Amino acid sequence: AESAEDIGRHLNRAIRELPTTKAFDKLVGGGRGGKLRLQADKPVVLVLGSGWGAHSLMKVIDTDKYAVVCISPRNYFLFTPMLPSTSVGTVEFRSLLEPVRVANPFVDYFEAVCDRIDLDEKIATCTGAIAYKDGRLPQFEVPYDILVVSVGEQSATFGTPGVRENCFFMKEIADSVALRQRIQNQFELAALPGTSEEDMRTTLHFVVVGGGPTGVEFAGTLSDFLRNDLKRKYPELMSYVRVSLLNSAQSILTQFDEKMQMHALENFKRVGVDVRTGVRVTEVTQDIIKLKGGEEISYGVCVWSAGNAPRPLVQQLAEQIPEQAEFQPGGRPSKLAVDPFLRVIGANDVLAIGDNSLVVGDRLPTTAQVAGQQGAYAAHMINRGFMPLTGGLQQPPPSKVADVLAPGQQMFATMGSMATSDDGDEGLIYYKKPFEFLNLGTLAYIGDNEALTEILGFKLSGGLAYLIWKSVYITKQVSFRNRVLILFDWMKAQVFGRDLSNF
Ligand code: FAD
């Protein structure tokens, strides 16, 4: 019988003797990676982010072959298309989330922000997202064999003064939680005895900046909440309530055709959302929104949904790689340029997927659909043993692809020592299938149980489109649990009305 100590010593020796990848050596031997599972000698795939791209990759990637590590400041996936519904209580926050540890229990997750990548040493430097009691934030490093960057983008303010300080955003669940409370607070404030009519008008003026799908869906959802729920509880305040939507373009929802845009505008007119197009916000102070031309609008709540900007990590990465420069508009790093195999151009063993990437030569929309499909594509490629060695636009030597590629097919090299072709040949082989986006359609909710849908060329607007919107989103949920929760939420809101508590 061996003592626990002896067994421990044997185990440690056995682990040390395992042939390991470079990253695995550092994780286990150097002890720099925290509590990674010791699962033999697997290459480490480091995934940055837990959004659409990363989540879909983690669902598909083969954790028998790879030690998958996820770094993200949020430990859950968020179903963003329905986020506006949570800000008025049509759907509850937690119904849209799936914890990373549930999405794939075999992935090692660390709640942290990746601050820096050393592309030569293949090490990510990270800061924990949660502080110790004394305020210190944990710092650590994670070495990798393959890096997948899927950190998305952040809300863009275009340098407009006062936006960060005075506006609400519609990007993360925390934004929606804060907004829901604020909407309700505004009504309680306006209902207090002694509030002047002018104060009521200002307090109950809800302004949405941005006429894209998110701004429009929020304005539509808010107007439903006002007409269906708040009207019953605060009837005396309703004559003071206003919802305005400001957009710098000449129309709204420009991804749909003109007829559908008109339908959305007419619908808003009918439900009392005041849409102003061709206006540019130049500043937001605590009390007013200033427009180009000098006009000032007093407001109670301003929701800013005017576009996306790059995350600092992505800018920093793009700056590190000289080959990226020619793909950055105006010389300012904004996205990681990738080849058709999603490999970051000019970097070794790095893939970029989702909103933070730009496939050179392809104009893909920055949507959940693209990010999700790219995540699954990248996972399949990695599962089949292809390492994303050099991201470049060069062609592989013709002798190496002749028997793998269809004649005339454009393709790019992958490598490797560990790659084995379908017929069992080992050695340098090439992945022949570049990423192709399959457009499954475009949907937008426009309020009052109406939506716009364009699916496989079929365009619909109105009530039927809303039913399609609902069915698509319920089927697209990432788990059965979420599907059931959302159905219950919809039923609850229908039967009892939306909750009006302001906690
Ligand atoms: P994200 O999903 O944004 O995920 C980024 C992840 O990276 C997050 O987990 C974040 O916490 C993490 N992260 C950030 N910085 C770091 C760091 N330094 N280190 C590590 N992790 C980091 N698309 C559609 O197709 N249809 C829709 O109807 C639709 N509606 C939308 C509604 C709203 C309100 C919003 C906000 C977006 C909507 N989108 C929609 C767009 C869609 O959500 C995005 O295109 C999609 O989220 C992009 O996925 P991603 O993986 O690139 O990034």
Image (tube, rainbow, N blue to C red):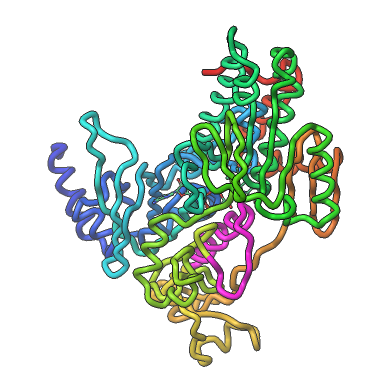
Whether residue 174 is situated above or below residue 77 in the rendered picture: above
Query: Residues in magenta?
Result: 358-384
Can residue 458 be seen at all in this image of the molecule?
A: yes
Q: Indicate yes or no whether the magenta region holds residue 286.
A: no
Residue 283 position in % (x across, y down): 52, 45
Residue 19 position in % (x across, y down): 27, 64
Residue lying furthest top? 193
Instruction: Between residue 243 and residue 413, name the one nearer to us.
Output: 243
Q: Indicate yes or no whether the magenta region holds residue 372.
A: yes
Whether residue 93 is situated above or below residue 31 in the rendered picture: above
Q: Quadrant of residue 299?
A: top right
Identify the residue at horizontal 17%, vertical 43% (top origin). 8
Residue 100 position in % (x across, y down): 47, 42
Identify the residue at horizontal 58%, vertical 86% (top origin). 403
Please tell me how many numbered marks the rendered image carries.
0
Identify the residue at horizontal 30%, vertical 50% (top origin). 126
Residue lying furthest front? 294
Identify the residue at horizontal 18%, vertical 43% (top origin). 7
Q: Quadrant of residue 290?
A: top right
Residue 114 position in % (x across, y down): 35, 52
Residue lying furthest bottom? 399
Q: Quadrant of residue 66?
A: bottom left
Instruction: Between residue 312 and residue 392, name the one nearer to us.
Output: 312
